[in-house]
Amino acid sequence: MITVFHLPKMGLTMDEATVTRWLKEPGDAVAEGEAVLEVETDKAVLEVESPVSGYLRLQMAESGERVALGAAMATFSSSPDEAISPDGAASEPATTPTKERVAPQSRPRDALPTAPVDGNRFKASPSIRRRAREYGIDLTEIAGTGPHGRIRMHDLEQALLARRSEETPAAPRGTVQAMSRARLATARRMVESARDIPQFTLRRKVDLGGAVRLRALVNPSLERSGITLSVTDFLLQAIAEGLMAHPAMRSALVGTLDAGRVAVAETANLGLAVEGKGGLLVPVLEHMESLSLVETARMRREAVAMARDGKLSGKFMQAASFTLSNLGPFDVDEFHALVNPGEAGILAVGRVQEETISLPQGPVQRQSLVLTFTFDHRLVDGADGARFAASVADALQSDSWRLV
């Protein structure tokens, strides 16, 4: 039995992925649920599992190739000698061993076809065809270097570089290199944010002394169990309380703006901006309204570790209503962040600062933090944003925390 496997959806925002490496080779036996390749999405590097038990026969995407959601990735068979055609479909029994047809010996580059395969047809995945249309490149003019003359993403990129070198005689300064998937995804989202979302910003300064003192008091005891509270944990709990008190902050547009419909999430799902290996990643922490500070710290630590390693699990790749971006560890005083498309707002914070304020009884030292809120004005008005900001500020300055 022949099974053609297609790239599954592995995240709400995923519409394509890049093949990073194959973990199995043609002819290898595989078990159902066993990882056969790794792909990189806009958020993480993920393992793709075999849907069946049997034998991997064809790899239908090359390492480094970008493939669209639902694209054919591999062909599996129930027996190692079952005959299949080069496109992965079942075929009539052949006189030569199947393994030789599936994995032919490599040919010199100058022996590869320089004309369309099968007359006016060429072999390329749907994602490469789409990219070629975007670039305005005729695939019939490209010599494919993949198996059976298949056009790989590398071939398309080389053709694009050749065309650009002809159009622009002057060589680019510096080394030209491809953007990482995470960097490219962030760039696209931020362009969409700046172009399509009307945004406004509010600032509040809070006295974080109470939270800082509580953190210093309990951390020595918590460290014995491997948990350490950070300022981020207090911020996450305060934002979650604000989200539950203000439903507009949990809303998102449904369809086009003209449709005039919004969906309001029932729980406080918070994105947390993290610097990953290839760029910015935003793991999503779910059900924050029900978590204690200790539980928040444990979840935050797990999410940050996976994001920095570039391998987020599915539980951190859901939809968020709001995001926190904390640049305090980089000694930033304050900054303004753009709203992530699909969310109602984002909170940007810098470092906790020591300042002196004048009171009737004399000067007093306090530890302050500037909160910079940015909202999607299609979903949130100024008064709504101000009330939400006040709720978050009040929670941060209170002595009431869900510690454990």
Image (cartoon, rainbow, N blue to C red):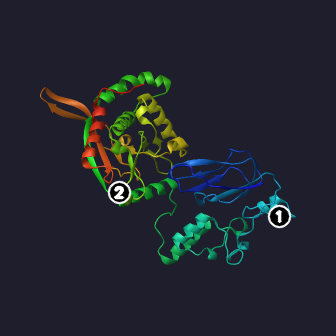
- Residue lying farthest right? 95
* 386 to the left or right of 286: left
| Residue 68, image x, y percentages | 57, 59
Query: What is the count of numbered marks?
Result: 2
Residue 378's tag is: none
Q: Residues within 10 Å of mark 1 (few under 14, many from 20)?
A: few
**Does the rendering let one see residue 335?**
no
Residue visible at 35% across and 42% down in the picture: 247
Q: Position of residue 176 (x, y in %)?
A: 50, 64
Q: Position of residue 124 (x, y in %)?
A: 64, 67
Asked if the residue under mark 2 is in contact with the one under mark 1, i.e. CB atoms within 8 Å, the reply is no
Q: Is residue 12 left or right of residue 343?
A: right
Name which residue type carries label 1.
Answer: Glu
Q: Quadrant of the C terminus?
A: top left
Q: Which residue is mark 2?
A: 197
Residue pointed to by mark 1 = 92
Q: Which residue is located at x 56 percent, y 70 percent? A: 132
Quadrant of the snapshot with the N terminus: bottom right
- Is the residue marked by circle 2 packed among few (<14), some (14-19), or many (20+) residues within 10 Å? some
Above or below for 166 versus 292: below
What amino acid type should be assigned to the residue bearing mark 2? Ile
Q: Position of residue 178 (x, y in %)?
A: 52, 61
Do we see residue 182 in this rendering? yes
Residue 20 placement: quadrant: bottom right
Which residue is located at x 66 percent, y 57 percent? 73
Above or below: residue 313 compared with residue 401:
below
Q: Secondary structure at mark 2?
A: loop
Reply above or below: 5 against 246: below
> Which residue appears farthest toward the left when viewing the image?
360
Displayed quadrant of residue 88: bottom right
